[in-house]
Image: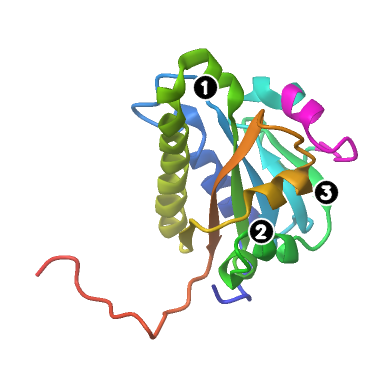
Amino acid sequence: MDEKATMPLEIFHTILKATMPERAKPGLPWRPQVNPVLFVHRVEEMDRGLYILLRNERAKEDLRGAMDPDFFWERPSRTPPDLELYQLAQGDARPAAKESSCRQDIASDGCFAAAMISRFEGPIEQYGPWFYPRLYWECGMIGQTLYLSSEATGFQGCGIGCFFDDMVHRMLGLPDLGYQDLYHFTVGRALADTRLIDLPAYG
């Protein structure tokens, strides 16, 4: 990522709305388990800091009780009414995004990054061990919509498969396996990697 681009607020909201479960057709046959925590770096009219997007509004009180009690849980001004977005903490989140994503610059140099926080012990105990990969399916659906909505709005996305989940848990104040960090993602303005060769998708 170029470490310079700033994302307009309207585009930020458009990208987040694309990840909401009601936008997925067909959707997953279970209630949403994954709520992304966002490291916001450069979004117009947004404070830098840590945010959470609730894809299941019923999860708010449970998450609030599980996380650091000092978090704000305040809705930013101009947030659309159909978007459950809350600011948790204010400040430069780039070091935390980079450090928790295996110290990769791509997590701190975009406009925002995400850590996908999923309910963990509860659904596995409820449905059985077979449900474990389904949590990753949900992360995959969120990641795919981030890829597509970023490209559609003139930005680019990149999944981040290497990350330190325990570091994120400590950052958020999550004490046990009630919630688990399962995947990371970043969105911004991409730079061409000269080490790679791009070829047409089809001959």
Query: According to the image, label 1 marks what residue?
Result: 124
Look at label 3 and name its amino acid: Ala
Judge from the rendering whether residue 183 lies leftward or rightward of residue 64; answer left or right. Answer: left
Specify the farthest residue to the bottom. Answer: 194
> What is the quadrant of residue 130 in the picture?
top left
> What is the quadrant of residue 35 in the picture?
top right
Q: Which tag, 3 or 1, sits closer to the chain's start?
A: 3
Specify the farthest residue to the left. Answer: 203
Q: Residue at x 44, y 51 (%)?
A: 149
Judge from the rendering whether residue 25 lies leftward or rightward of residue 85; answer left or right. Answer: left
| Foreground label between 1 and 2 | 1
The span shown in magenta is 62-74
Image coordinates of residue 97 in percent, x first then y, are: 67, 60
Look at label 2 and name its amino acid: Ser
Q: Main secondary structure of the magenta part?
A: loop
Helix, strand or loop status at disc 1: helix
Query: According to the image, label 3 marks what residue?
Result: 89
Residue 42 seen in the figure: no
Look at label 1 and name its amino acid: Ile
Calculate the distance from the C-alpha at mark 3 to the C-alpha at mark 2. Answer: 16 Å
> What is the quadrant of residue 173 in the picture?
top right
Query: According to the image, label 2 marks what residue?
Result: 100
Q: Residue at x 42, y 42 (%)?
A: 140
